[in-house]
């Protein structure tokens, strides 16, 4: 378990600025373990393994190259993004263990709202049946993690049609609102924090 883990709720923040803040945070000699909860304005991000051909038609949504793992994804209002700025060396977590821990956290979170979810071998993220509800993409640098997971809760899902989400053609996506109408963003953040405190 980590001592002095801080949670920050940042509201809606620019992707580029947040990326720079994460990079400087993990390099800080006074590094502290933090979990950030936020939303981004509409943006497509390409992970380090991304093939640009998976962006079918960005229309007016900006496309940015990110340094997280994984393929192409979409961020937008109504999606809870959780960034994990953690000393995984201290936690004694391998990158693989961190990914599986985060996925299990989302599964547990969805169970709180009576939503059954599953994982698909070789395709990181969390699914409800065959539809993706959460995407994971991390970066590890000198024993510290950054980036994290995005959970669709009450958003316009149409931009996902403009890409092959996570590099999969015709992959369908879903969100919490379509499966359980009674969840507010505040509840979602609060339960996420309660669960994450127990995990880390």
Image (cartoon, rainbow, N blue to C red):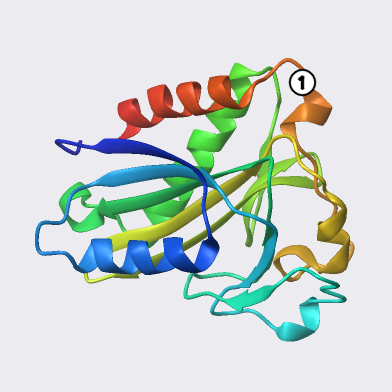
Q: Residue at x 47, y 54 (%)?
A: 148
In front: 58, or 71? 58
**Is residue 143 something one can see in this rendering?**
no
Residue 55 is drawn in which quadrant? bottom right
In front: 152, or 89? 152
Neighbour tally class for label 1: few under 14, some 14-19, many 20 plus, Cα within 10 Å: few
Indicate the position of residue 40 as horizontal and vertical percent values.
59, 53
Q: Residue at x 32, y 53 (%)?
A: 85
Indicate the position of residue 57 as horizontal and vertical percent values.
87, 75
Please, is residue 20 above or below residue 115 in the view? below
Q: Residue furthest left?
A: 29
Indicate the position of residue 139 as horizontal and vertical percent values.
40, 67
Residue 180 is drawn in which quadrant? top right
In front: 10, or 44? 10
Residue under pointer 1: 180
On-image quarter of the C terminus: top left
Q: Residue at x 25, y 63 (%)?
A: 26
Please, is residue 70 above or below residue 92 in the view? below
* Horizontal relation, residue 111 to residue 74: left or right: left
Q: Residue at x 40, y 44 (%)?
A: 36
* Horizontal relation, residue 187 to residue 121: left or right: left
Indicate the position of residue 114 as horizontal and vertical percent values.
69, 17
Q: Secondary structure at mark 1?
A: loop
On-image quarter of the N terminus: top left
**Is residue 195 something one can see in this rendering?**
yes
* Horizontal relation, residue 191 to residue 27: left or right: right
């Amino acid at each position: 378990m980590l001592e002095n883990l801080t949670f920050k709720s940042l509201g809606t923040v620019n992707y580029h600025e947040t990326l720079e803040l994460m990079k400087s945070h993990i390099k800080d000699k006074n590094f502290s373990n933090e979990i950030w909860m936020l939303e981004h304005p509409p943006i497509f991000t390409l992970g380090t393994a991304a093939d640009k051909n998976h962006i079918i038609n960005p229309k007016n949504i900006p496309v940015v190259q990110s340094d997280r793992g994984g393929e192409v994804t979409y961020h937008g209002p109504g999606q809870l993004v959780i960034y994990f700025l953690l000393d995984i060396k201290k936690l004694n977590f391998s990158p693989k263990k961190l990914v599986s821990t985060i996925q299990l956290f989302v599964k547990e979170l969805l169970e709180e709202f009576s939503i059954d979810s599953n994982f698909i071998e070789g395709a990181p993220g969390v699914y409800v049946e065959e539809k993706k509800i959460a995407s994971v993409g991390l970066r590890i640098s000198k024993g510290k993690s950054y980036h994290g997971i995005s959970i669709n809760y009450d958003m316009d899902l149409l931009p996902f049609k403009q890409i092959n989400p996570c590099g999969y053609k015709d992959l369908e996506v879903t969100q919490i609102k379509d499966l359980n109408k009674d969840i507010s963003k505040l509840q979602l953040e609060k339960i996420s924090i309660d669960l994450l405190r127990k995990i880390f």
